[in-house]
Image (cartoon, rainbow, N blue to C red):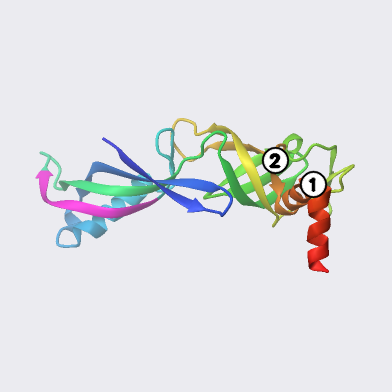
Amino acid sequence: MLSIRKKFIGCGRCETTFNVVTLTDSVRIPPDKFGGSLENVAKEQLKIKYEGIIDEELGYVIAVTNIEVSPTGKIIPGDGATYHKVTFSLLTFYPRIQEIVEGEVVEVADFGAFVRVGPVDALIHVSQIMDDFISYDDRQGVLMGKETKRKISVGDSVRVRTTAVSLGHGGSFGKIGVTARQPFLGKFEWIEEDIKASRPATEQKTELKDKT
């Protein structure tokens, strides 16, 4: 039985959810490991089994933590190893539809850009970057809007909304789709410009007067 409690990593204006999942399993302690630390051997086994996998229920498994191994093991006929009950926690990342997240652009191509969200890269298709016709500059590695002249390139910080999540059926693959074509999403610079543009003219004049 899984016992899930959530942790949040706040970004000031949005939150990305990481889960701490506690579960029970059994680990095999081979004869050549007898006399060593049960916790160390169990951790090695659990890391091999769980870390780096993508599971429909757990999401992306990042790390194994908080291991407690029963000192009493069982022997199976024909196997010289002992089997011990172990309780442990997994740090996981489970992306959710409609969740607003922030990340860094790590790759740009003619079909869109990849944004590092938590431990994974999410695809923002070229059609979901901005409400403008976009062209790709291969030499500069830049996607640019024809009318707005807004650019997106590697290293840019962006805020996006998760629109599609596919975790497959276990293993080491998964896909996340995101969009920036909604109000107050996209590059941080664009968001600041949009917020400023949405303010009443009188408020903008007052702000300018205060600066002078």
Q: Measure the alpha-carbon separation of dots 2 and 1.
A: 24 Å
- Looking at the rendered image, the quarter that the C terminus falls into is bottom right
Above or below, comparing residue 209 to residue 180 in the picture: below
Q: Is residue 58 left or right of residue 87?
A: right
Is tag 2's residue or tag 1's residue first in the polypeptide sequence? 2
Q: Where's residue 61, x and y in %? A: 42, 45
Q: Which residues are magenta?
A: 63-74
Residue 187 lies left or right of residue 75; in this view the side is right
Q: Residue at x 48, y 40 (%)?
A: 172
Q: Residue at x 83, y 38 (%)?
A: 132
Q: Amino acid at mark 2?
A: Ala
Quadrant containing the N terminus in the rendered view: top left
Is 126 magenta? The answer is no
Q: Helix or strand or loop: what does disc 1 sit on?
A: loop
Residue 134: horizontal and vertical position, in percent? 83, 40
Q: Is residue 195 above or below residue 78?
A: below
Mark number for residue 180? 2
